[in-house]
Image (tube, rainbow, N blue to C red):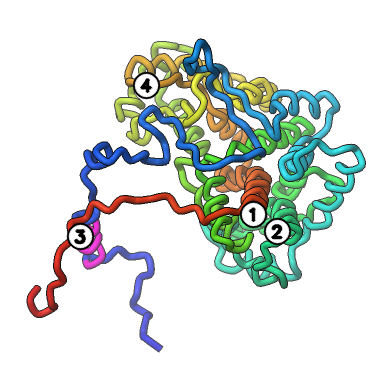
Amino acid sequence: MPNTSNVNFSEITPEIQHLSELCVQNSSIDPSLYTKYQVNRGLRDVNGKGILTGLTEISDIISSKEVDGKSVPCDGELYYRGINIQDIVDGFLKEKRFGFEEVTYLLLFGDLPTKEQMDAFTSLLAKYRTLPTSFVRDIIMKAPSRDMMNTLARSVLTLFSYDDNASDTSIPNVLRQCLQLIALFPLLSVYGYQAYSHYHDGNSLFIHNPLPELSTAENILRILRPDSKYTELEARILDLTLVLHAEHGGGNNSTFTTHVVSSSGTDTYSTIAASLGSLKGPKHGGANIKVVRMFEDMKQTVKDWKDEKEVTAYLKALLHKEAFDHAGLIYGMGHAVYSLSDPRANIFKKFVKSLSEEKGLTDEFELYSLVERLAPQVIADERKIYKGVSANIDFYSGFVYSMLNLPTELYTPIFAISRIAGWSAHRIEELINAGKIIRPAYKSVSVHRPYVPLADR
């Protein structure tokens, strides 16, 4: 056994620093070559429009319409299996039902469920909402991570070992695996946080069991809070969050990852772990955390939250890299697809207002509303943009999570708890329509040169 007692696993040594400089020196590509070879960086054209790489029936995003032969920006629309998300939300809210389970059924099977189908489906999810014996003790409680997405991915990969048919990619088996993961994601996420909170922060450890008669949103709040208590409004807004995050086309980074990895023929657990790795990125699932922290800085910097000039000055400082994290961004504003509006943000806003009133945080809500109104004009004045800019769903979701007293460590896992529904539908769609492995091209721009013997270097 090698002696590793003096090794610091996390240390960047001078040797590593030097080698990293070699990486940068010899792996930096001339930016002009991307233009020369017409490379669609990020699989997007020069106008930011995504390059068509596949077909899907699961969801549709509309951000522009043809008028007199020209593409004209329009208010954003989102469809799940051909049904407008606004109509879906209006439907279950009117009947005072929770919607996430219904939306999950729709995404997976293509049609809205009947009452009997819905009852059977929720019962099946409740049945699967049980972890293997001692999984919490042996896996989640051991070496808890500071990052809950890491914990979630590790738990998903470990479930492979508990599945006797883990590598079977037949549709019935993959559907069974996906339903189990949809049911288990709330437990894996929240229990992972409880372990982290206990071992790293010294808080009391408690593990609540989910109740079969409760919705996904209700169970999240029940197992997270020490007293398991929550209001009806809290549960309904969390449920709405899950509905609006459940699916967003095949081209978003994590769902495209699902397609890419599924096309290789690998197992469900490896595929979903890869999707989690994508969602973990701050450019994707971690954006709402940035929004919350930006507003925390704004509230400390801006003395009068209702002063438009003062708020505008702060927003300009953000763009000039003079405020918050000096990244030059107003987080929560703009979207890769939507221009005039994000339909999810529009649906969300009125419910956010209701929750802010229940929580006594109307001043904070008014600040968010003011920034939502001012930021597009500030960005238009300061930047050259090819399309409109509007608030996206991340703009309000982080505010909602903070009002629900959800720890920031769970913000992105909540996204995953929702998006696993869409990932599952896309994985099954990819397997049903399996063609070639997805393999886009990269052009080599290296200079060919001879091999030099070691003694002559």
Q: Is residue 434 magenta?
A: no
Q: Which residue is mark 3?
A: 22
Query: Does dot 2 land on a helix, a strand or a loop?
Result: helix
Circle 3 Cα neighbour tier, 10 Å, few/some/many (<14 / 14–19 / ≥20): few
Three-letter residue code for mark 2: Val
User: Is 457 positioned to the left or the right of 277 in the image?
Assistant: left
Mark 2 to mark 3: distance in Å? 44 Å
Query: Does dot 3 land on a helix, a strand or a loop?
Result: helix
Q: Which residue is mark 4?
A: 385
Mark 2 vs 3, N-terminal side? 3
Magenta stretch: dominant secondary structure: helix
Label of residue 347 in the image: none
Residue 400: quarter of image: top right
Mark 1 to mark 3: distance in Å? 41 Å
Look at the image and tell me whether residue 217 can be seen: no
Tell me which residue sits at (42%, 40%) in the image. 43
Residue 73 rendering spot, x and y as whole percentages: 50, 17
Q: Which residues are magenta?
A: 15-23
Mark 4 to mark 2: distance in Å? 43 Å
Residue 455: quarter of image: bottom left
Mark 1 vs 3, N-terminal side? 3
Mark 1 to mark 2: distance in Å? 9 Å
Mark 1 vs 2, N-terminal side? 2
Mark whose residue sits in front, 4 or 2: 2
Label of residue 174 in the image: 2
Q: Are marks 4 and 2 in contact (CB under 8 Å)?
A: no
Q: Are marks 1 and 2 in contact (CB under 8 Å)?
A: yes
Label of residue 431 in the image: 1
